[in-house]
Amino acid sequence: MNLQFFAAAAASSLFAGCAPISVTDVASTYYQLPATTTVIVRQTITIPPGAAHVTLQDGRIVAIDHLRRYEPFCQFEVNDVFETEQQVRPGQFAAVRIIRQQKLYGEERQPLLLAANTVTGSQNDAGIGTVLLADNGYDASFLLNEVRLRLQSAEQPHVRELRCAGGWDFPSAVAYPTLAEMSRVLGTLISIEIN
């Protein structure tokens, strides 16, 4: 009888480790937005010609070359790319699907050149005449943790999703954006409401 009890206790402990942990603190990076979340566009958003999204940071739309990639940012996306600008009018959107995902960005492994024989400008550029003594094994990979809210509205069916990221970081330090960080990024343009 004791053996059955211990086996049942061990099995329940093992399977309890597979159960998702529910975090209720909205300030936590581990907090997951509920299925009843809505996104409210508070001001008209203009998607430029030839694009399907705008990038937001510090409560305003920013050009991609002005984005501070290591800080939280969001992208607001529509379904199609047009030759003319597109307008998203103020309105309410249901978040019909909320996904938390990681994306890996990196560069090809580059060997660390510690020594070379007969290096000239042209030879070094072509990789000719070099002797590799060691490889540092460093691959400049960064992770991006995103919260993706798939949006739906009968009035504006061309709106696709709102993606918010915690900023690029090394795998050991990357975090999902908190609700407060996403709100700060979106400013007065867009808000995320938990119902």
Image (tube, helix red, strand yellow):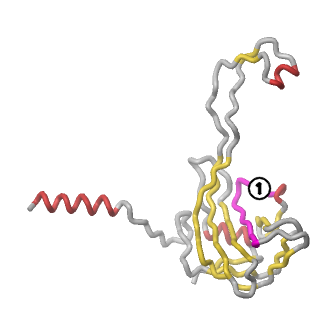
The x and y percentages for residue 49 are: 89, 68
Residue 27 in the image: state x and y as whole percent: 56, 68
Q: Which residue shows up at 69% across the image and 26% down it?
A: 112
Packing grade of label 1 (10 A; few <14, some 14-19, many >=20) is few
Q: Quadrant of residue 40?
A: bottom right
The magenta segment is 67-79
At 54% across and 66% down in the image, what residue appears? 28
114, 105: nearer the viewer: 105
Position of 192 with respect to 41 (left or right) is left
> Residue extending furthest left?
1
Q: Quadrant of residue 163?
A: bottom right
Location of residue 120 in the rendering, given as x and y in whole percent from the top left corner = 86, 17
The residue identified by callout 1 is 68
Q: Tag 1, which secondary structure?
A: loop
Q: Is residue 155 magenta?
A: no
Q: Quadrant of residue 146?
A: bottom right
- Quadrant assignment for the C terminus: bottom right
